[in-house]
Image (cartoon, grey):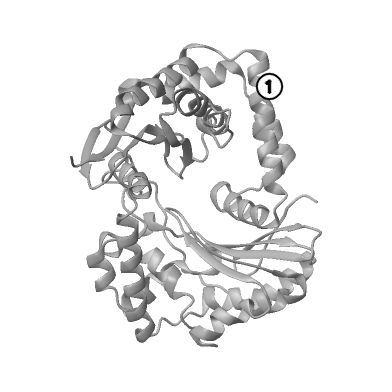
C-alpha cells in the first residue's frame, strides 16, 4: 500500500503506510536539529532529546522508561544536524499505549532540575567516550572543517562548557520554540488503520500553536583545506571530500548512485575492491553522501597503517578520476542500478526502516516517494549524468582532507 499523508487541525502532519505484521513502528520527527542552535545553545537539541525521557506532566522518568519496555517494545531517540526523532517499536495490540507515551514525552516534558543535573553527567561522559573514538570523531571534525562559520559546522553533542551551563529555563525556551505540532511530523508503519492513528493523535497531542520556528537558509563560503592533526592513535585516519548537492538538487539521486558504486556497503564497491581486496591497506573504508536543506557533503573515510596512507590516498584519487574521466558502459550502469534498487528493496522489508524513511522524506522533501517512484528516478540516470556529477564533485582542486596521524 502506498504511503498516505494527512494534516491535522493542529498543523501536525501524519504519514502512514499499512504494513501487515504483528509489530508497529511509530515516531515523531521534529524539524529541529543542531543547525537550529545559537552559539550558546550548541549541544542543546541533543541534550533535550536525552531529557525527554526524564519526566512529563503525567509521569515520572521511571514510568516513561517502563511504559513500552514492560510490554516488550523498544523506545528510542536520536538527534541529527537537521532534526530530532523520538520513535518506538511495539506489538500492534499496544498501539494506543505507545502513541500516548510518544505524544506525552514529545509535548509534555517538564525537565526536572534534578534530572537535568544527572543528565549533564551522562552527556559529558558521552562526549569523553566520543573523543576516545577517532574513527567517529574525524567525521564530525571534517564537517566542522568544511562547514566552518555555517550552522552545520558544529558537533551534535555540543561543548563541555555549554552542557555545564544549560539550565531548566534555557531548555524550556528552546523546547517551546521548536516542539510545536506544526513543526512536527508523525510517521507510522504497521497493521492499524489510518483512522485509528489519527483518532489517537487527535486525543493525545495538543491543539497547536501559531508560534512556529523560523527557518532561513544560510550561505556557505567553502574553501578547500588540507589539515593534518597529531593524535594519540595507532592507525592513520583519513577523511577527504567536497561540499555537494542539497536535498532538492536535480543531481542528488545521481550522486547517491555514484557514491554506491564508489564506496557503498557492497563488497564489490570500487574502493573496497581496489584498496582493501587488492592491496589489503584498509579494513574500514567507505564513501558517503549526505544532503542538507542548503548544501551537502561527499566524503571518503579510510583507516590504515601510517606507512600505507600515501599509497591509499593515491588509489582513492585514481578511482575518483576514473569515474570523472571514463563513462560507465551499459552493462556497468545497469548493474549499478540493480544493486541500488535491491538494497533499497531489502531495507524497505523492515517496518522500522520504512517508518523512519517516510518521516525523513516528508520532513526533508515535503513528499513521500513510493519505492516505484524511487526506482523510476534511478532508471532515468544516464552514464553522461554520472560522469558530469563525478567531474563536478570529485574535482581535485575542490577536495578537502583531514588526517589524524600518530604522535610518534
Please say if 316 is above or below 265: above
- Asked whether the viewer can see residue 174, the reply is yes
**Count of numbered badges drawn on the protein:** 1
Please say if 67 is above or below 235: below
- Asked whether the viewer can see residue 42, the reply is no
Locate residue 246, reporting x and y percent. 47, 38
Residue at image x 61%, y 78%?
Answer: 101
Q: Circle 1 is placed at which residue position?
A: 334
Circle 1 residues within 10 Å: few <14, some 14–19, many ≥20:
some
Q: Is residue 67 left or right of residue 225?
A: right
Quadrant of the image occupied by residue 32: bottom left
Quadrant of the image occupied by residue 285: top left
Please say if 354 is above or below 369: below
Query: Considering depth in this image, is 313 or 282 the residue closer to the camera?
Result: 282
Locate residue 358, reporting x and y percent. 64, 52
Please say if 210 is above or below 344: below
Locate residue 36, reporting x and y percent. 38, 58
Locate residue 37, reporting x and y percent. 34, 60
Residue at image x 33%, y 41%?
Answer: 219
Query: Considering depth in this image, is 326 or 202 the residue closer to the camera?
Result: 326
Amino acid at each position: 500500500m502506498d504511503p498516505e499523508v494527512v494534516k491535522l487541525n493542529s498543523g501536525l502532519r501524519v504519514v502512514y503506510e499499512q504494513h501487515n505484521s504483528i509489530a508497529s513502528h511509530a515516531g515523531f520527527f521534529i524539524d529541529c536539529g543542531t543547525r537550529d542552535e545559537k552559539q550558546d545553545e550548541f549541544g542543546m537539541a541533543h541534550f533535550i532529546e536525552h531529557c525527554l525521557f526524564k519526566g512529563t506532566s503525567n509521569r515520572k522518568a521511571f514510568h516513561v522508561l517502563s511504559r513500552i519496555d514492560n510490554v516488550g517494545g523498544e523506545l528510542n531517540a536520536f538527534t541529527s544536524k537537521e532534526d530530532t526523532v523520538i520513535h518506538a517499536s511495539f506489538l500492534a495490540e499496544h498501539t494506543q499505549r505507545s502513541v500516548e507515551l510518544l505524544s506525552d514525552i514529545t509535548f509534555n516534558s517538564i525537565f526536572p532540575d534534578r534530572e537535568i543535573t544527572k543528565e549533564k553527567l551522562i552527556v559529558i561522559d558521552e562526549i569523553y567516550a566520543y573523543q576516545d573514538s577517532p574513527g567517529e570523531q574525524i567525521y564530525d571534525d571534517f564537517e566542522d572543517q568544511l562547514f566552518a562559520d555555517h550552522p552545520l559546522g558544529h558537533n551534535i553533542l555540543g561543548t563541555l562548557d555549554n552542557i555545564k551551563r544549560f539550565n531548566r529555563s534555557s531548555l524550556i525556551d528552546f523546547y517551546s520554540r521548536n516542539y510545536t505540532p506544526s513543526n512536527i511530523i508523525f510517521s507510522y508503519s504497521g497493521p492499524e488503520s489510518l483512522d485509528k492513528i489519527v483518532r489517537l493523535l487527535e486525543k493525545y497531542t495538543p491543539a497547536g500553536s501559531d508560534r512556529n520556528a523560523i527557518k532561513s537558509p544560510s550561505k556557505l563560503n567553502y574553501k578547500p583545506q588540507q589539515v593534518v592533526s597529531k593524535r594519540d592513535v595507532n592507525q592513520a585516519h583519513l577523511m577527504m571530500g567536497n561540499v555537494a548537492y542539497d536535498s532538492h538538487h536535480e543531481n542528488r539521486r545521481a550522486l547517491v548512485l555514484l557514491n554506491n558504486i564508489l564506496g557503498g556497503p557492497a563488497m564489490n564497491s570500487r574502493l573496497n575492491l581496489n584498496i582493501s581486496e587488492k592491496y589489503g591497506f584498509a579494513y574500514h573504508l567507505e564513501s558517503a553522501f549526505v544532503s542538507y536543506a542548503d548544501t551537502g557533503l561527499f566524503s571518503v573515510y579510510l583507516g590504515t597503517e601510517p606507512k600505507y596512507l600515501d599509497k591509499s590516498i593515491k588509489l582513492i584519487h585514481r578511482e575518483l578520476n576514473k569515474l570523472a574521466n571514463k563513462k560507465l558502459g551499459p552493462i556497468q550502469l545497469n548493474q549499478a542500478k540493480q544493486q541500488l534498487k535491491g538494497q533499497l528493496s531489502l531495507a524497505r522489508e523492515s517496518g522500522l526502516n520504512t517508518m523512519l524513511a517516510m518521516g525523513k522524506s516528508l520532513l526533508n522533501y515535503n513528499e513521500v516517494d513510493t519505492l516505484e517512484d524511487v526506482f523510476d528516478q534511478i532508471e532515468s540516470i544516464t552514464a553522461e549524468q554520472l560522469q558530469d556529477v563525478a567531474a563536478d564533485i570529485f574535482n581535485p582542486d575542490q577536495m578537502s582532507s583531514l588526517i589524524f596521524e600518530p604522535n610518534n
